[in-house]
Image (cartoon, grey):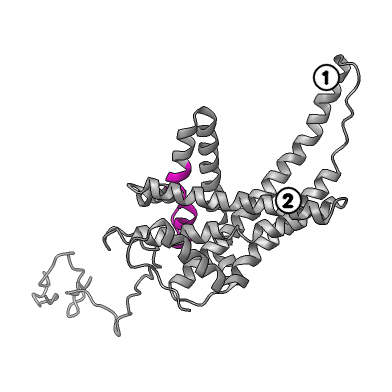
Amino acid sequence: MAFRKPNRELSVTEILSFSFSLYVAKFDVMLVPFLFISVFNTFVTDFLWRLTPIFELPQNISEEFFLQFFNYLATIFPLIVAIIVINWVITTIANGIVVKLSSETLEGKTVSAKTGLDSVLSNLLTLLAASSIVSILTVFGLFVFLIPGIIVATMFSLTVQVIIIERLGILASLYRSRKLVANRWLKVLILLSTIMFLTVTANIIGQVISSSVTSFNTTMALIIEGVVSSLVLPIHPISLTVLYYSLRTREKPSDQTLPPKLLIPRIKQPYPYSQMPPYFQPKYCYKCGVRLPPDAVFCPQCGVRVRTE
């Protein structure tokens, strides 16, 4: 089945239906990035947690207890930060790869995981910086009041798509995402809520399956849970990519931001002969040999013409 960019604005139902069809058609390449990060995250998280010492709660809470507790926090804090950073980086890479693959498919180009990985790695710093800004603003908005966090998450939901497809910078991609989402807040919010519901449902199903299959092996249970949840995770970047192209149909061609083109300077061809000045000013008279003034037209000694104009 051939997929093309939508030529009109799609509804939420149409976006989800189109995204699922695209996911099923390209299931092998779309699933691999998230399947890899799920298994990788499981092993890394399990390895780091095994390095964490066990904190035993004493019977009597005293000053020594607080000292031990703060020492314990100082020990596990770097491990928690390492787990969060590793998950954040590889999840950003997986999202970017699937966005690039979805875009290439909708553009009618050849899809390959290598192309997606190369595109993400070339924009990795921009992706990480933009996603960190959005995450900080969203968490801050949710902490202060629920609605600002939801607004920020909705406003900048297409930042990754803009960076990968239009290759814009950090601030330009944030502004571009806000411009695309303008006047379509409710549609984007419904789409994000639906995707979140599917993701949470997949996580719950994964936990139920993992707990019923493996009751003692924690690592295997986490792997099963990660594999089940990774089946739904590609829907998020695919749906937002379809939403991006759907919202672009509202714009005039002059309003659409195109990727920057490489400007090749034009090299002047050398002249076949050396350029001569419009006139030649000799220093000495060719007839009598007297030294000539700088602006002389005739020789002051013999009167012969020495400059041709």
Residue in the image at 39% along x and 46% along y: 186
Relative to 92, residue 264 above or below:
below
* Magenta stretch holds residue 100: no
Q: Which residue is mark 1?
A: 66
Task: Indicate the quadrant where residue 57 lies.
Answer: top right
Relative to 246, residue 199 above or below:
above
Taking the view exactly as shown, the residue that stands out farthest to the bottom is: 272
Which numbered tag is attached to residue 27?
Answer: none
Which comes sooner in the sequence, label 2 or label 1? 1
User: Majority secondary structure of the magenta segment?
Assistant: helix
The region drawn magenta spans: 153-171
Which residue occupies the foreground of this view, 13 or 31?
A: 13
Q: Secondary structure under badge 1?
A: helix
Binning the other alpha carbons within 10 Å of mark 2 as few (below 14), some (14 to 19) or many (20 upward) gives some
Q: Secondary structure under badge 2?
A: helix
- What percent of the width, then of the height, locates residue 139? 55, 36
The three-letter amino acid code for the residue at tag 1 is Phe
Is any atom of residue 195 visible in this view? yes
- What percent of the width, then of the height, locates residue 260? 39, 63
Residue in the image at 88% along x and 50% along y: 216
- What percent of the width, then of the height, locates residue 238? 51, 61
Residue in the image at 27% along x and 63% along y: 253
- What percent of the width, then of the height, locates residue 70? 80, 25
Taking the view exactly as shown, the residue that stands out farthest to the top is: 62
Taking the view exactly as shown, the residue that stands out farthest to the left is: 303
Is any atom of residue 166 visible in this view? no
Q: What separation in Å lies between label 2 and label 1 (alpha carbons)?
A: 35 Å
**In the figure, is residue 145 to the left or right of 187?**
right
Relative to 71, residue 225 above or below:
below
Which numbered tag is attached to residue 207?
Answer: 2
For the residues labelled 2 and 1, say whether their Cβ atoms are less than 8 Å apart. no
**In the figure, is residue 250 to the left or right of 166?**
left
